[in-house]
Amino acid sequence: MKGKLKVNNNQLLDRWTKEKSEELYNIKNWSAKYFSINKKGEVTVNPFRRDDQSAVSLIDIISGLKERGIDMPVLLRFENILDSQITFINNTFTNAMKRLGYKGHYRGVYPIKVNQQQVVEEVAKFGQRYHHGLEVGSKAELIAAISVMKDKEAALVCNGYKDTEFINLGLYATKLGYKCFFVIEMQGELDIILEQAKKLGVEPNIGVRIKLSSTVGGHWSESSGDRSIFGLNTTQLVEIVDKLKERDMLHCLKLLHYHLGSQVPNIRDIRAAVLEASRVYAELKKEGAAMGYLDLGGGLAVDYDGSQTNYSSSRNYTVDEYCTDIVEAVMNVLDKSEVEHPIILTESGRSLVAFYSVLIFNVLDVAEFEKHDLPDSLPEDTNETIKNLFEASKNISPKSIQECYNDALYYRDQTREMFKHGKISLRERALSEKIFWNIINDIATTKKKVRFAPEELENLESAIADIYYCNFSLFQSIPDSWAIDQLFPIMPLQRLNECPSNSAVIADITCDCDGKIDNFIDLHDIKKTLPIHKVKNGEDYYIGVFLVGAYQETLGDLHNLFGDTNVVSIKVDENGEYDLVNELLGDSVADVLSYVEFDPKHMRRSFRQSSERAVKEGIITLAEHREIMDAFDTGLAGYTYYEKD
Ligand code: PLP
């Protein structure tokens, strides 16, 4: 009886808890309190960032979607999170300004390119309270902006190369009362702006984009510095000022802009850039330009891995520090020059929308790495190289892992060569592969007991990881994971009060060897595998990829013709009730085919002819013909992802 109690106590002590999952997936550090884990061990969303009943389980949302017939994968967008983030950046800047005695104010603009889908309308709606405006970089984006923007107090910043049509549209917007700024990126643009403004009788608001000498670290370091491709150097800037002076239009120069690049991880780079730009601002004022707006572009980073470091998927500052440092730096420079504090404008996109979307997909299949059963000894007549490999498998110890690894590779390669030259059979080769993988597995286990494992063995875990095949396309839904090795927080959405017993890499369904995720967030490093539960028979097991609201939807492509996923917008209320405020069905097969210039009607006609011919030739019956055509039509109308029967 006593013994039994002891066992139970030990089990109790070792019991996995949701708190252990919180630590394992580092959720508290990357979620900005928007996501957490509830007592049932499910991930919840809480747009109000409070530990109360307003949190909604993502598994409950998925059940609701299932009942409505909405298939996986699904992109969930949380309207309130967007609202919260807009409020957050505006309040944080305003508070920093109040605290430091700044005499200007803050205006944000949302760059449409970061996520065009629906977000623009929502930013225009939620942003009105703070006069949060929009930034556009093309004619199409300008048209989108003026068709949704109602707030004439908010800024409308036009970046990018501007032709006459683009400029005319902006001038008409100015005529309608919008605070529309033309930011000159190329000297040639000024002539067109002045010419068209004169023709249309509109006084333009002009801005200049400058190249700073300050450079930044992170993924986009090339967007900064003297050699960046966008913006004016100081010589060109002076020429613009002279031209405006000549035309008696210097009063139209109101805004100075720079953009360091996106996801700037180091606050020192941000501060250095603000100081430099503030100096230029003060000089432009001295030249006699009207000014009034200092536009610091984007760059406010998101802490995707929650490490709070200057690693490229993180940032070594809080939003509060970002705002405070900017305001302080501007004040420092301008107070010395006795220049009035300008309206500080930022073009934050990523930090505004990253939290807003979560990609959810289901696991379709699992290939578990299993240790093979092998006999204690091999028959006498076994090939000598295989015997040597087998011998190596018996000698693994913490001190010999590197040696065993070398032996294993050497003998495995030898057996492969022998197979190529017909010296061993297929069965013998299969035996050698089994022994090899058992050795790798044992080395990986033994490695955990070693304080300093050899560098060569660093990635061994991913070689023996389980593969979880999941219903999504990396290229469509998280392209930056493939293109620039960007890390996103990824975790199971359920069973988080159970210990995840497996370690996996995630494979998508594109059958592209790059269509996999084998880098996962970790507080101190990058994990090569994701801790995950063994999927039970018949269980629907869901995984979430978080913070995918910025850039991913826009950059996603049709690799292997997997199209847009289903998208559901959700609004959560303070009592934890939620509404599906919008539902957008993902692309059908016919849709994606038409995007790549197939004509589904023509394809159907042509396939029908083949099938009719087969009937004539007696290969199939008429009934079979009908069945085949039904299958073709169902296929065309279907979702491009794996659909459950
Ligand atoms: N402004 C400009 C000119 C940009 O090119 C970008 C994107 O790179 C942004 C703003 C948005 O930057 P972020 O998403 O880092 O806020």
Image: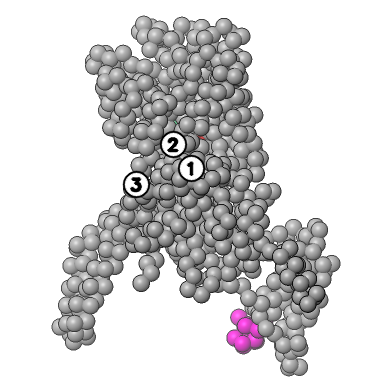
Mark 1 packing: few (<14 Cα in 10 Å), some, or many (20+)?
A: many
- Give the number of the disc on residue 47: 1
Give the answer, above or below, for where 232 lies relative to 56.
above
577 lies left or right of 543: left
Q: Which residue is mark 3?
A: 581
Read off the magenta span. 419-432
User: In which quadrant of the rendered image does the C terminus lie?
Assistant: bottom left
How far apart, in angstroms, are the residues tagged by discs 2 and 3?
Answer: 15 Å
Q: Which residue is mark 2?
A: 83
How is the structure coloured here?
Answer: one colour
Magenta stretch contains residue 425: yes
> Which secondary structure lies at badge 3?
strand
CA neighbours of label 2 inside 10 A, class few (<14), some (14 to 19), many (20+): many
Across and down, in percent, residue 587 comes to 32, 56
The three-letter amino acid code for the residue at tag 1 is Pro
Q: Residue furthest front?
A: 1
